[in-house]
Image (spheres, rainbow, N blue to C red):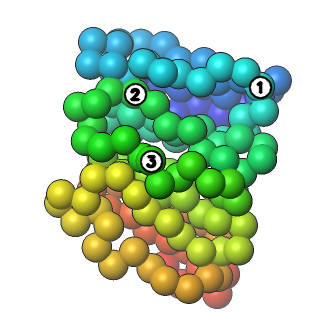
Amino acid sequence: FVAIACGTYHNVGLRSDGTVVTWGDKSVGQRHGSPTGKGFVAIACYATRSAALLNNGRVVTWGGDRDFARDETLSSAGYVAIARGIGHTVALRCDGRVVSCGNGSVGQHNDTPTGSGFVAIACGGFHSVGLRDDGTV
C-alpha cells in the first residue's frame, strides 16, 4: 500500500498499481460501490463514506447512505487533493480553489473559502480547513 484511510469500522487502501481496496464492516454500506480499475492517486474516508482521486483529476465517492448525501457535485475533473468529513467532501482544484459538497445540515459548508492560493485541505467531522500558499489557515 502507498496510502491508507480509516472510516467508521472500515478502511480504504491505495495500492502502488493505482487500485483501491476496502475492508472491514459493511453493515451500513461503508464498502458499497467501491471503485474498480486503476489510476487512483489519493483516498480519503470518514464515517461511512469514502472518496478516491483519479490521475485525471476526477473524484469518485462511495459508501453508506447513512452518512448524509451523495457528493454529486464533484463529477468534473481538475482536482488534486481530497478530504472527507461527516456528510461532506472537500476537494482542492488544480488552480488552488477549494470546493465543498455533500450535506450541509450542520454547517459543513458555512464559510467555504473563496479565491485561490490553497495548497492543502483537511476535514474533521463537521468542519474543514485549508492551508494557503502564504502559510495562513
Callout 1 secondary element: loop
In the image, taking residue 16 as reference, residue 36 lies left or right, namely left
Q: Which mark is residue 63?
A: 2
Report which residue position mark 1 lands on.
38
Which of the two residues, 123 or 66, is positioned nearer the viewer here?
Answer: 66
In the image, taking residue 7 as reference, residue 103 lies left or right, namely left
Quarter of the image with the N terminus is: top right
* Sequence-wise first label, 3 or 2: 2
Query: Which residue occupies 77% across, 25% down?
Result: 38
Q: Is there CB contact under 8 Å for labels 3 and 2?
A: no
Quarter of the rendering containing residue 116: bottom right
Would you place residue 98 above or below residue 64 in this image? below
Report which residue position mark 3 lands on.
72
Query: Which residue occupies 35% across, 13% down?
Result: 26
Q: Amino acid at mark 2?
A: Gly
Residue 63 in the image: state x and y as whole percent: 40, 27
| Residue 121 visible somewhere in the drawing | yes
Q: Is there CB contact under 8 Å for labels 1 and 2?
A: no
CA gap, disc 3 to disc 1? Answer: 21 Å
* CA neighbours of label 3 inside 10 A, class few (<14), some (14 to 19), many (20+): few
CA gap, disc 1 to disc 2? Answer: 19 Å
